[in-house]
Amino acid sequence: MIALADIGGVWPITLVIKRQTWLPDAAVSAAVDYLVVEAQRRGRLKLVEPSRPAQGSGYIVLAMGKMGSGELNYSSDIDLIVLYDHEALVSGTEPAAFYVRITRALIKLLQERTSDGYVFRIDLRLRPDPASTQIAISTAAALDITRGRGQNWERAAADQARPCAGDLAAGEAVLAALSPFIWRK
C-alpha cells in the first residue's frame, strides 16, 4: 500500500517516509507482545497489563538510526538496541539468559527467510560496546558502559533513539537517564 500510494502520487514523500517507519514499529511491537505473552505462559514473566503485554515487562526495544529518526526508506534495515530491566521476571529466572533468548526469538521472527521472504533485516550493532556485550543488555550495564566509555559516534546515534516496542515507559526512562551523555553542557 505504501509503495502504491508513493508511486501513484497519492501521498507526499514525507507521509511515505513516516509510514515506512510505522510499519516496522508495528511489526516489532507485535512480535515483542507475542514473545512476552509466550514467556508469561511459560511462567517466566509477570504481565502487568494483559491487554498491553509488553507494558511493565522490562523488555525495551529502542529504534536507532533511520528508524529512530523516522527516515526509513524501502531498502533500510532496522537498527535496534534491546535493553532489559529484570524486575518483571518471576524469581528463579536468570535475567541475561532469558532476555537474550527473547531477543534471539525476536530476530528469528522478523529476519528469518521463508518462502514468502522476511519481514525486516535487523542490525543490533549500535548497542553499547557491541564487541563484548550480549544482544540484550541490562539497563544498568548500558548506562554504565555509555557513561564510562561512550564514544562520540554513540552520542550521535543516541540522539536519534526512541522506544519503539516493549516497555515504552522504561525506554523513555532510559533515554532520560542518557540525556546528560547525549547532550553535554
Image (cartoon, rainbow, N blue to C red):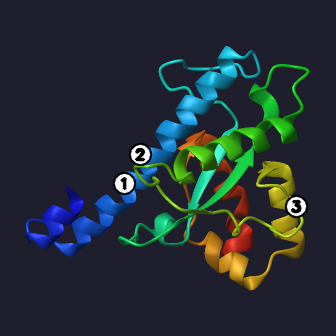
- The reply to whether residue 184 is visible in this rendering is no
Quadrant of the rendering where the C terminus is positioned: bottom right
Locate residue 100, reporting x and y percent: 78, 44
Q: Is residue 88 above or below residue 95?
A: above
Where disc 2 sits, the SS reads helix
Q: Residue at label 1?
A: 22
Tag in front: 3 or 1: 1
Q: Quadrant of residue 156?
A: bottom right
Residue that label 3 marks: 144
Q: Quadrant of the N terminus?
A: bottom left
Could you tell me how far apart the alpha carbons at marks 1 and 2 are, in whole angstroms?
6 Å
Identify which residue is drawn at 91% across, 21% down: 92
Q: Are marks 1 and 2 in contact (CB under 8 Å)?
A: yes
Q: Is residue 171 left or right of residue 114?
A: right
User: What is the secondary structure assignment of the residue under circle 3?
Assistant: helix
Upstream in sequence: badge 3 or badge 2: 2
Depth check, front residue: 45 or 58:
45
Q: Which residue is mark 2?
A: 26
Left-right relation of 182 to 85: left
Q: Position of residue 82 (x, y in %)?
A: 69, 52
Disc 1 residue type (three-letter): Trp
**Residue 150 visible, this angle:** yes
Query: Which comes before the other along the chain, label 3 or label 1?
Result: 1
Mark 1: few/some/many CA within 10 Å (<14, 14-19, 20+): some
Q: Position of residue 10 (x, y in %)?
A: 8, 65
Disc 3 to disc 2, C-alpha distance: 30 Å
Q: Amino acid at mark 2?
A: Ala
168 lies above or below 180: above
Rendered position, 130 above or below 108 = below
Residue 52 numbered tag: none
